[in-house]
Image: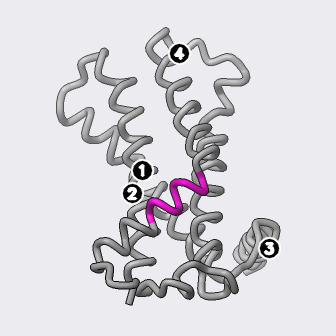
Amino acid sequence: EGAGMTWGGQVWHSLQTDLRHARWLLAAYIAVIAWLVVDRLQGGASDEITSWLPYVLILLSGLIIITAVQAQSPSAEGASWRVLPLSPTAVLASKLALIVCLLLLGLTGQWLALAPFQPDAAQLRAALTDSVSPFLICGGISAVVASQTRSVQGFFLALVAIGLCFVLL
């Protein structure tokens, strides 16, 4: 499998492909993190635009995950893993690695924003770990729903349908 590539090589190849395809979304994600860090370091002026940026981060991370998963999902007819072929576990691992990369970028931004205030280790750990679970839950749900849909529109429709089911139950 993978035209002679090792499993790790397949993961790396798939991750590189995802990062290349999402480069503009990723650049926007990093820019929003940088904006939030700078805002926090300047005293958290928190104008109306800045107050919406965490939601923009959630949307961007979701779009990055959705596009990466849908490009190589089992339902994608032109998926590169069918052509090479890549091990399905290597493709899955690359998607998980992408989610971890996005998480680490966000945590790095948080750390940069908090470090000048010299929090003790317990405060810093608590602030950073409070972000992990919600991000992984949202990222995991995004990945699962994206793997079962073929477009961003289909993803959002499925997400609305799932949300309605929870509201109606």
Q: CA distance from mark 1 to mark 4?
A: 22 Å
Q: Pointer 4: what residue?
A: 44
Judged by its main secondary structure, the magenta piece is: helix
Residue 136 makes an appearance in the image:
yes
Q: Which residues are magenta?
A: 15-22
Q: Pointer 2: what residue?
A: 100
Dividing the image into 4 quarters, which one contains the C terminus?
Answer: bottom right
Crowd rating for badge 3 (residues with CA inside 10 Å; few <14, some 14–19, many 20+): some
Label 4 is placed on what type of residue? Gly
Based on the picture, tell me whether residue 130 belongs to the magenta stretch.
Answer: no
* Nearest to N terminus: mark 1 or mark 3: 1
Q: Pointer 3: what residue?
A: 154
- Per the image, label 4 sits on a secondary structure element best described as loop
- Per the image, label 1 sits on a secondary structure element best described as helix
* Residue extending farthest front: 3
Q: Do callouts 2 and 1 mark residues in contact (Cβ within 8 Å)?
A: yes
Numbered tag placed on residue 103 in the rendering:
1
Judge whether 32 appears above or below 143 on screen.
above
Residue 167 makes an appearance in the image:
no
Q: Nearer the viewer, residue 80 or 40?
A: 80
Kindly report which numbered mark, 2 or 4, lies closer to the viewer in this rendering. Answer: 2
